Amino acid sequence: MTFLRIPLLLSCLTSPVFAASSVPAIPPALKAEASSVAPTPPSSTAQQLYASAQSDLLQLRVLLKNGRSQSAVGSGFLIGKSNLVITNFHVVSQIALEPDNYFGEFKDTQGKSGDIELLAVDVQHDLAVVRVNRNGTGVFNLTETPATLYQGEHLYSLGNPLDLGFFISEGTYNGVSHRGFTDQIMFTGPVNPGMSGGPNVTATGEVAGVNVAHRRDGELVSFLVPATYAQKLFASITPESKPPKDFKPIIGEQLLAHQTLMMNTLLATPLTHKKLGPYSVPVRESEQVRCWGSSDTKGEKTYNTDQINCAMESELFVSEDLQTGSISMTHRFVQTNKLDPLRFAIFIGKMFSNRVNGNTKDENLTTGHCTEDFIGNNNFTSRAVVCVESYQKFSGLYNFLLFTSSTDEPLMNLQSRLVINGVSYENGQKLITQFLSVFSKENSVQKNEATITTSSSANTAKENN
């Protein structure tokens, strides 16, 4: 068996960036988007909670230093009687990454305002701590033993949605999501833009979590960062702590820690396989990675296509133009009974070239370096291209992209793609090697139409090239 050789020249190991539209359309949980469902009128419990908590709620704004125009807005809450505020990292990420260009301000429910000072970040859990020039009244507290939550229990999210003023929204606790590599609380209630970073509390006022996101493909499917992660970050600093001179090395270390967790989980068990025509192709189906199948056999086309898309449903937010810590894989099986071998080979060659070269430059990544070779194992032969790119601001992190195209049949073709974002060089190599080792082909090729097992999910993923 032979595998694609990846050069060990780390200084030049970079690759092209691929457009977001090339990733299988599996809807992720995104930062809070506007919901079309109007919140129900607040209960007496919600009214009492808001009345007692409003004094320690803050709106946080990130502004461009040149012109003082608003760039981001979110919420936060004062912890205990300190002057420290918990919020989301994605609310203040521009201050962490570009402190020369951005600064932050707060405004409370009484109209008091002032500057904010970023002290600590936790990119893995989308949390941050900022310091302000006022103290809390002791409403919100973080304990080492968080509140025990029960299915269907009422919870209450507070924040400043859409910059309309401070709101409280009522919903229910519905368990913990394990779709990512860190847990998130599922909250059936509205969490709208501007509420990110605000507190979510129980009926007795205990902090259950921090507002962070909701599914844009559903209604009232929202997510919270569990309070235990906020407590750990808060405990790592004091009101007298000095801010780091540069957050980028800290963020880089956290991204490396996340990729270690992610890759250890993914590499702990072998990839499984699915059938596409005569080929067996590698897939990963787990709590973190979901697969969809689709087929296009329209009679007017000169070829038929069956496809499998697998992708993680979570990734880490670093900035508006950089999300990382994700993996996806796509397999496309094409066959024809209307084209001759030469015309089919030309068609497949153009398809492969478009997939490899149809990418755009990303300023967050260095120029890509690609290596091409031919591989063969398990009665399967293919052309393969590996591209590697390194992160401009975060040393030791790379994106890998693998393309393969089978070369063993005149009237059928299997093209596969593996995208690995935000991993160490060693881990990228390991996953590529494992991925390539799974491919195989039946000894005798059946000439009838190939089929694949498709998911019953209504969210069938279709790739757009």
Image (tube, rainbow, N blue to C red):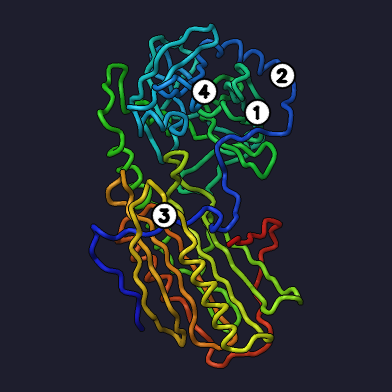
The CA distance from mark 3 to mark 2 is: 45 Å
- Front: mark 4 or 1: 4
Residue tagged by mark 3?
421
Local crowd at mark 3 within 10 Å, few (<14), some, or many (≥20)? many
- Which residue is drawn at the image coordinates 56% and 12% (left, top)? 54
Q: Judging from the image, what secondary structure is the residue with disc 2 in?
A: loop
Q: Judging from the image, what secondary structure is the residue with disc 4 in?
A: strand
- Sooner in the amino-acid sequence: mark 1 or mark 3: 1
Residue 214 point in image, percent of width and height? 60, 38
Q: Judging from the image, what secondary structure is the residue with disc 3 in?
A: strand
The CA distance from mark 4 to mark 3 is: 30 Å
Choose between 210 and 369: the one closer to the eye: 369
- Type of residue at label 2? Ser
The CA distance from mark 1 to mark 3 is: 38 Å
- Front: mark 1 or 3: 3
Local crowd at mark 4 within 10 Å, few (<14), some, or many (≥20)? many
Residue tagged by mark 2?
43
- Front: mark 3 or 2: 3
The quarter of the image holding the N terminus is bottom left
Choose between 231 and 8: the one closer to the eye: 8
Residue tagged by mark 1?
154
Answer whether labels 1 and 2 touch (C-beta < 8 Å). Answer: yes
- Sooner in the amino-acid sequence: mark 3 or mark 2: 2
Residue tagged by mark 4?
75
- Type of residue at label 1? His
Residue 136 point in image, percent of width and height? 44, 11
- Type of residue at label 4? Ser
The CA distance from mark 4 to mark 2 is: 22 Å
Q: Does residue 45 appear to the left or right of 332 in the view shown? A: right
